[in-house]
Every structure is written in C-alpha cells, then in structure tokens.
Image (tube, coloured by chain):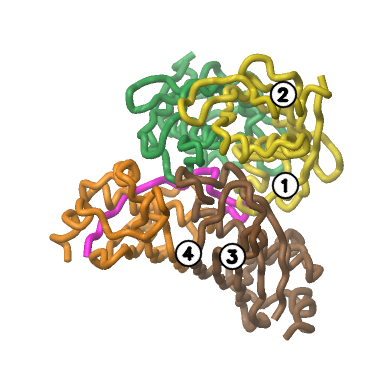
Chain colours: A yellow, B green, C orange, D brown
Amino acid sequence: MFVTTCKTRVRYAETDQMGYCYYGNYPTFFEIGRVEALRTLGVRYRDLENQGVMLPVAQLHIDYKKPVKYDEEITIETTITAFPSGTRLPFDFRILNEAGEVTTTGSAILVFASTETGRPCSAPLAVQQALKPYF
Amino acid sequence: MFVTTCKTRVRYAETDQMGYCYYGNYPTFFEIGRVEALRTLGVRYRDLENQGVMLPVAQLHIDYKKPVKYDEEITIETTITAFPSGTRLPFDFRILNEAGEVTTTGSAILVFASTETGRPCSAPLAVQQALKPYF
Amino acid sequence: MFVTTCKTRVRYAETDQMGYCYYGNYPTFFEIGRVEALRTLGVRYRDLENQGVMLPVAQLHIDYKKPVKYDEEITIETTITAFPSGTRLPFDFRILNEAGEVTTTGSAILVFASTETGRPCSAPLAVQQALKPYF
Amino acid sequence: MFVTTCKTRVRYAETDQMGYCYYGNYPTFFEIGRVEALRTLGVRYRDLENQGVMLPVAQLHIDYKKPVKYDEEITIETTITAFPSGTRLPFDFRILNEAGEVTTTGSAILVFASTETGRPCSAPLAVQQALKPYF
C-alpha cells in the first residue's frame, strides 16, 4: 500500500446554492490526489503522457458522508491499494475537513492506455519500479 | 420504474487534453438527467428547494466504458429505480453517444433533506404522488 | 453583422453559495454561443480543428448587470460584429433571462491559429464564404 | 496599492482538447487571488458573507497573451488598485507561468452588497481599516 496526503482549499467556484461544495467536484479532488501521489513517488503524470501513456478512469465510486464548505482547507488522502496488475491501477480516497473528520470516501480504477491508439497497455516501468517497495 | 431521456452537447469547457470529455463532468450530466426526470413528472427541483426540501447525493457510482468527444450530442437516460422508501431516492443513468452506443453507466442515491436543518426527511407528497403510477 | 441565439438552462453545478450562477461560467456560455453561431453558418468548429485551425480567445470582457439563477432557461445572443480581418474574429454577447431582460453583456476577440504550430493564421475560406453575405 | 501573490497548479480538469488551460478557468484563478489577497490583509471573505456582506463581480476583463499548460504551477498576482470608494473595489491580476513570464492579465470591479437585500453597500469597516495603510 502507498498512502499520501495533500491539501487544497474549497473555491467559491466549487460551491453550490445549498452552500456546500458541489458533489461533482470530488472527481477533480481525487484527480489532484492521484497526481500528487504519483509525484511523491517520483513520477510526473505529465511526463507519462508525453511518453505516450495516459491513465483514463474506468470506474469511480463515491460515498458522501458530510458536506464540505466554502474556504475549508480539505485534506485529500490517496492510497494506491494494489501493485498494477496487468493494465489497471486501483486507488482509494478519503477527504477530511479542517476538523480532521472523514467527510467523503471513494475509490477509482484507472487504466494505463496508449495515447496514440487508446488501447490498454501495461504499467510503464518507471511506475512499476516506484511502486515495488510498497507492495 | 420511471425512465426519461434528455440531450445535451459536450462543451469545449468539458473536454480535457486527452481530447475526451473529462470524467469529472458526468456527475453534472447525471444532475441534468435527474432534474429533467423530475420536470417530466411535473416536479420542479427549484420549487422543492423553495419549499424547504433539498436532494443531496449520498452515493455515486460510474462505469466509464467508452469516451465521449467534444460537440457530440449525448443522450442522458435517467431511471428512477424504486419508489422513495423512507428518505432515499435511487437513480440509474446511461449516457449514449450520437451512434446510440452506451458509453457510460452510473447510479446514485439521493436523500431528501430539510434545507433548514440539513436533516433527512421523507419524500414530499408531490414527489410521492407523481411517482406512484410508475411503481 | 451576423446574430444568432440559442438557449441553455443554468445547471445546479453552475450555482454558487450566493444562490446565483457563478460569474466564471459566463465564458462557457459565450463559447456555446460562438459554436452555435458558427453551426448556424454551416461551419462546425470541430471540423475546423480537425482541418488544423483552432480559435483561441485573445481578449474577453464581461459586464454583469443582473444575476441569473438556478434552472433559468437563459438565451445566449451571439453577434459576429465584423468580417474576419487578418487573423481575428470579434464577437459580442448578451445573456437574457426568462423574463427577456438583458442580464449580462460581453465581447471577445478570437484568433485563428494553426493547431500544429499555435501561430495565428488567416480565417479558413469556409468561414470567409459563410460570413461574406452578412458584411 | 496592495499586491499579493499565491500559487496554484493547473488541474487536468482545467485543460481542454487544445492541450491548454481552458480560457473559462481564469475567473476562478482571479477569485482565488482575491480571496488570498483579503486573507493576507486579515480579512476572511467567508466571514464577510457570514456578517451579511458579499462581493459579486460587476465587470471583468481578461487579456490572454500566452497559454498555460497542464500541471504548471502558476503564480496569481493580485493587486487592489484603489481604496474602496463608495461600494466598489477594483482589482488587477497577472498570471505568471513557471518560467516567470506573464501569460495573462486582467482586471475586475467588485461591488460590496448586502447578502439579504442584494443591494450595494459601502465597504465594511474591517476592509477599510485593513486597506488604509496601503493608500
């Protein structure tokens, strides 16, 4: 398992008229978490794409437990839950509010794919080597 | 069961640099589908909120099967899968592309809640009466 | 001058906690207006890009006169104010609410550019021919 | 004059299929800049709203000089250009890329308004006192 955290602040743009962070912004928070998790491992997602490998999302699940509010500095906790077997990379996510409460949990399955053909491919060696120590 | 469809066109704002519709836009597509499903039933979601009842999302699941592209006119098919028992209203979604292929499937559980207290409440009578013929 | 209108409904995703449509969504409304204006002229923007010409925005101005609210069906009025001289195409915009009141006015200058080099280029012949009758 | 800077990273969600940061995201960047400028002055915008004063945008201007790309850490430079006279607060903005180049400039005029009535009001004393030393 590999776990990292990063922080971001809920933007006014991300609120809705309920006065909460709109539910459709959490996929973006999870994306931020994934990219920072990879960066911590020494892998920049932008380099992967430049090298011909992209990581589209195949499956997403979110449980909304508590709302998050405008201007709260939330913590995005990202876990890579398994070594990439075949073409897939599984993630778990938790969003914590300023009081440290878990407000949201989620998971996603991403697929390594060729930027040229769009077809699934195996995890690049750089990703495999970076993750090996954690599994 | 109650099924409706509506259409929307993928905006440039909704694309990403993979050249696809960004995965984080689908919750918004599902929201459009829900609101139009209710409108077809004679219930305007904006009226519900004005009457003190909101419908936050408790759970969301999405399976991304095929990408959708810029300027495609997609069909959002929304199904209310069960009569609101207690405080919850369950939805299924399918996104179809211009060729009629199912590109994305999803589901969500929404909760009727008081706009004042934020606490769950039972489905407003207007919603129950509108849905009764379908279950 | 060439004027068209199209309609869209303010999404819940587009509201903010003031209870209005967030000010940052208007550039997207203007983009919808531009694309539909071109479509009415027989030019699909997606085809332009496939043929190697894109239309990035160089300048944007917006005057917010009245707020627009959730679920309002707004009218986007788009005017091409001049024949493309050199590499630039100027637009004016007005957003009208359901009561027909002008809530927002704006303008933008777009630049024809090569998708390959990013450099400005002259307007494609198809665009010139489509616009000629109006100027 | 009062000038502050803050940083944010361009999200994948914010890219478009040109491979650039979508032009409609800059109002959100400016909003982040404004909120952080006020925070540096000791004023939290969320407190202003809780105290009954909001700050909607009346006018926005943006000049797009160079594109910004995915994953770039951009600097948002925010300048309050004048002491709030009457009900208005004017801002200037510059977005710099990782190389320190100015990619985008902009300006906005915000209006202090009552959250209850929506009517313009004068700048809260806390804002006036925080800004006084700079003008």
Q: Nearer the viewer, mark 4 or mark 1?
A: 1
Q: Residue at x 60, y 68 (%)?
A: D94
Image point (45%, 67%), residue name:
C61
Residue D120, image x, y percentages = 59, 73
In the image, what residue occupies the spot 62% across and 25% down? A110
Q: Which residue is mark 3?
A: D56
Which numbered disc, 3 or 2, marks the residue closer to the eye? 2
Question: Is any part of residue B92 visible from this angle?
Answer: no
Residue A4 is drawn in which quadrant?
A: top right
Residues at circles 2 and 1 in contact by the CB criterion of under 8 Å: no
Q: CA distance from mark 4 to mark 1?
A: 26 Å
Is the residue at mark 2 from the same chain as the one at mark 1?
Answer: yes
Q: Quadrant of the C terminus of chain C?
A: bottom left
Q: Total label count? A: 4
What residue type is disc 3 on? Pro
Judging by the rendered image, the residue that carries numbered circle 1 is A69
Rendered image quadrant of residue A12: bottom right
Q: Which mark is residue D66?
A: none
Crowd class of label 4 (few under 14; some 14 to 19; many from 20; radius 10 Å)? some
Looking at the image, residue B88 lies above or below residue B22: above
Chain hosting mark 3? D
Label 4 belongs to which residue?
C66
